[in-house]
Image (cartoon, rainbow, N blue to C red):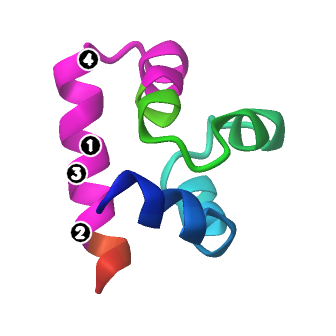
């Protein structure tokens, strides 16, 4: 998903992100504010993922919310 599109749809997909990654707090989601890189960074921080793991998890999730 294009970065601008992701940011624009953030309010719609924020709940889906919370369901997918329960360790992300509401404050985390507010800080992320639709920025892919911030989401990937928070996944690394909260789940101990490498950058590659976090990016792969993001891509899989992105595909599911597009449907």
Neighbour tally class for label 2: few under 14, some 14-19, many 20 plus, Cα within 10 Å: few
Q: Is residue 65 left or right of residue 1?
A: right
Q: Marks 3 and 2: CB-CB under 8 Å? A: yes
Mark 4 or 3, nearer chain start:
4
Q: Marks 4 and 3: CB-CB under 8 Å? A: no
Question: In which image quadrant can residue 50 be found?
Answer: top left
Q: Give the alpha-carbon distance from disc 4 to disc 1, as whole Å.
A: 10 Å
Q: Give the alpha-carbon distance from disc 1 to disc 2, as whole Å.
A: 10 Å
Label 1 element class: helix
Question: How far from the left and from the top, in percent, is residue 57?
Answer: 26, 43
Q: Is residue 58 above or below residue 41?
A: below
Q: Is residue 49 left or right of residue 33?
A: left
Neighbour tally class for label 1: few under 14, some 14-19, many 20 plus, Cα within 10 Å: some
Magenta residues?
Answer: 41-63
Q: Is residue 53 left or right of residue 46?
A: left
In the orientation shown, which residue stands out farthest toward the bottom?
67
Q: Marks 1 and 3: CB-CB under 8 Å? A: yes
Q: How many marks?
A: 4
Q: Which residue is mark 1?
A: 57
Mark 1 or 2, nearer chain start:
1
Label 4 element class: helix
- At 40% across and 13% down in the image, what residue appears? 48
- At 26% across and 17% down in the image, what residue appears? 51
Mark 4 or 1, nearer chain start:
4
Question: How far from the left and from the top, in percent, is residue 52?
Answer: 17, 22
Q: Which residue is mark 4?
A: 51
Label for residue 59?
3
In the picture, the quarter occupied by the N terminus is bottom left
Q: Which residue is mark 2?
A: 63
Q: Give the alpha-carbon distance from disc 3 to disc 2, as whole Å.
A: 6 Å
Question: Quick check: is 32 in the magenta stretch?
Answer: no
Mark 2 or 4, nearer chain start:
4
């Amino acid at each position: 998903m294009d970065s601008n599109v992701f940011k624009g749809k953030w309010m719609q997909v924020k709940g889906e992100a919370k369901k997918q990654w329960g360790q992300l707090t509401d404050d985390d989601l507010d800080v992320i504010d639709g920025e892919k890189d911030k989401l990937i960074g928070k996944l690394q921080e909260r789940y101990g993922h490498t950058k590659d793991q976090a990016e792969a998890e993001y891509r899989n999730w992105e595909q599911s919310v597009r449907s």
